[in-house]
Image (cartoon, rainbow, N blue to C red):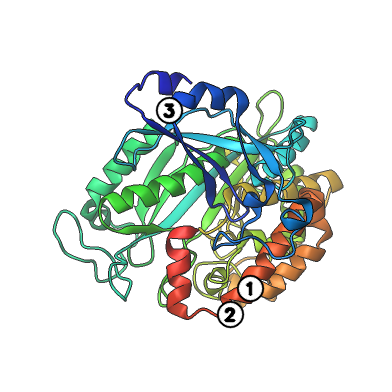
Amino acid sequence: MNWLAEHPEVRTIRVAAADLNGVPRGKRVPARFAEKLLSEGTKFPYSVLNMDIWGEDIEGSPLVFESGDPDGLLMPTERGFMPMPWLDAPSALLPIWMFHPDGRPYEGDPRQALARVVERYKAAGLTPVVATEMEFFIIDDSGKTLRVPPSPRSGKRRTGAETLSLRALDAFDQFFTQLYDACEAMDIPADTAISEAALGQFEINMMHQPDPLKAADDAWFFKMLTKGVARQFGFAASFMAKPYDVWSGSGLHMHFSLLDAEGRNLFDDGTEKGSAMMRHAVAGMLRAMPGSTLVFAPHENSYDRLVPNAHAPTGIGWAYENRTAAIRIPASGPKARRIEHRVAGGDVNPYLMIAAVLGAALNGIEDALEPPAPFEGNAYDKDLAQLPGTWSEAIETFAACDETKRIFPQHLIDNLVMTKRQELHYMAELTDEETVELYLDTV
């Protein structure tokens, strides 16, 4: 309530929860009801967190007509009220998550799924330290053909990718300055920005933090914020996995390490190789990777990114300081020893993605699994087991995977499978142009 109390100019509140696709669902409420929202929350149907990408009910879902479409209880998260710098009128965002009326967490809520994994870590006396790398495109979508927007400074358009180019960053300096100011206002720990490998593509890294729920919140908020600020400049910001056929797609890479109760990094054994616990975590992630692919690549367009020689992994393997690997152990001092998971696209639901990675790692630690030997060289040239190559294969692999059943509640698995099967069916009716239009702003 503190932020809102300090801003009497705020007239409206948006209460918002993430559905299974990561799409914000919620309500617009007059600010005079702020106290009531904090103490009583709000309600909307359980089925709202289980909509398809168009915002339609899932046909045959027991959450809808079979049960009378009952309400769940949405209560504020620990984040409280936040500014919404991308709106013209001063407004407040209140993040919420879903419970049953008797106070039990609703198992179909993706944030609750991550909280469940975090509780497993707490019970084991472990604290994950998490950071994300957020890749996105800025796009002029005002015409029939997508292209890079003109620079607000020069009025000129870039004609090619400029990896790690200061010129590319400076061309959109006003946008990035406003975006960083907004991140600070929303307590989103934005760190370094770089120009990426594709036309109009950029990356902003988040700082490491010992709170996976906040890391996921920050990634979710950052998506909303970046899209909104871009529209203030007259162009789109898209986290779509592959908006252009000829350029590499956008990932959402995740770095993490584990601390014990004394704050020691349990992946550090004083050597460059890392500890046995780190290897167990790697093995768990490799074992769960085929079944988790639907979480890392949740949309039809996601699979356009996961192709050989396109800066996205296709093989299930790990390596040291090797960006062709699905799981990379970055070069660092021993105390900073960590794992980078490189499979997820920018279009993921951050709550499900972080839950899938951390849950699989903990499975491996609990089972004391040993990974195969790390490979060297180009992963695309290795004889590695492959990720599911199609959306339909990923859906069915997720539905049948024993490892994902250790990570996610069966109710959430069933809901996500129903959602993706429905989307798969209806996506077949769309042209390529309609597919891009659907995903560009939504994911």
Q: Nearer the viewer, residue 434 or 204?
A: 434
Disc marking residue 428: 2
Q: Secondary structure at mark 1?
A: helix
Q: Earlier in the sequence, mark 2 or mark 3?
A: 3
Three-letter amino acid code at disc 1? Leu
In the rendered image, the vertical position of residue 73 relative to residue 393, given as above or below? above
Residue at the disc numbered 1? 424
Q: Disc 2 to disc 3, how far (Cα)?
A: 43 Å
Q: Residues within 10 Å of mark 2 (few under 14, many from 20)?
A: few
Q: Are marks 1 and 2 in contact (CB under 8 Å)?
A: yes
Q: Residues within 10 Å of mark 1 (few under 14, many from 20)?
A: some
Q: Position of residue 141 (x, y in %)?
A: 32, 67
User: Which-is-in-front pick, marks 2 and 3?
Assistant: 3
Q: Quadrant of residue 196?
A: bottom left
Q: Disc 1 to disc 3, how far (Cα)?
A: 40 Å
Q: Nearer the viewer, residue 417 or 120?
A: 417
In the rendered image, the vertical position of residue 249 relative to residue 21, given as above or below? below
Three-letter amino acid code at disc 2? Ala
Q: Position of residue 115 (x, y in %)?
A: 69, 38
Left or right of 323 on screen, residue 284: right
Q: Secondary structure at mark 3?
A: helix
Residue 283: in sight, yes or no? Answer: no
Residue at the disc numbered 3? 31
Q: Secondary structure at mark 2?
A: loop
